[in-house]
Image (cartoon, rainbow, N blue to C red):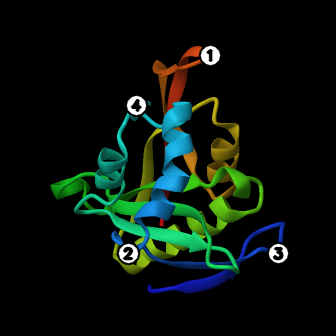
Amino acid sequence: MGAVKTDAHRSGTSLHIRPADPDADADALWRVLEPMIRAGETYTLDRDMSRADALAYWLAPGHATFVAEGEAGEVLGTYYLRANQRGGGAHVANCGYVTAPEAAGRGVARAMAAHSLEEARRRGFRAMQFNFVVSTNGRAVRLWESLGFETVGRLPGAFAHPTLGDVDALVMYRRL
């Protein structure tokens, strides 16, 4: 699937979801990723991670990385899609999603999730699994549940939240 134009849920925001260009999109990706990394509330990434390391992680070999652009071409979010495991687990997809702070609550994450589910099916994946959903990330948990994901595991105190202390992480799964 190449670029897709979609209306973001609830806001009517028109989004264009397309493959990321590692060179042309680097600044926009960093602008979206840096606040999430520095906050340290949703991903198991070092809060002091450098721009170069963050971009290398997000654009890693094996990641199909996408950006969601608004009507003016501004990047409002990004996600990557990859195989969750190798070998016998390669038929299960895994994704990571980040919405720009100014786009929160505008349906960008829902649009990227819908795009990723279709893209995963198109690539032959038969299921999708999120290995480490921080339980205090209520927006994400509600979104995944609304899209048919089930919590299939709970890792007690597995995430060291910077303000809440140790909180649970969830393993969420759905068949495609």
User: Do the residues under discs 3 and 4 have CB atoms within 8 angstroms?
Assistant: no
Whether label 1 touches label 3, CB < 8 Å: no
**Circle 3 or circle 2, nearest the eye:** 2
Q: Is residue 152 visible?
A: yes
Secondary element at tag 4: loop
Residue on which the image places disc 1: 164
Q: Earlier in the sequence, mark 1 or mark 3?
A: 3
Q: Which of the two marks, 2 or 1, is nearer to us in this view?
A: 2
Q: Which residue is mark 4?
A: 48
Q: Is residue 46 above or below residue 81?
A: above
User: Which is more foreground, mark 3 or mark 4?
Assistant: 4
Q: Residue at x 25, y 54 (%)?
A: 89
The type of residue carrying mark 4 is: Asp
Residue closer to the observer: 36 or 134: 36
Q: Which residue is mark 2?
A: 21
Classed neighbour count for the residue bearing mark 1: other residues with Cα under 10 Å, few (<14), some (14–19), many (≥20):
few
Q: Label 1, secondary structure: give it.
A: loop
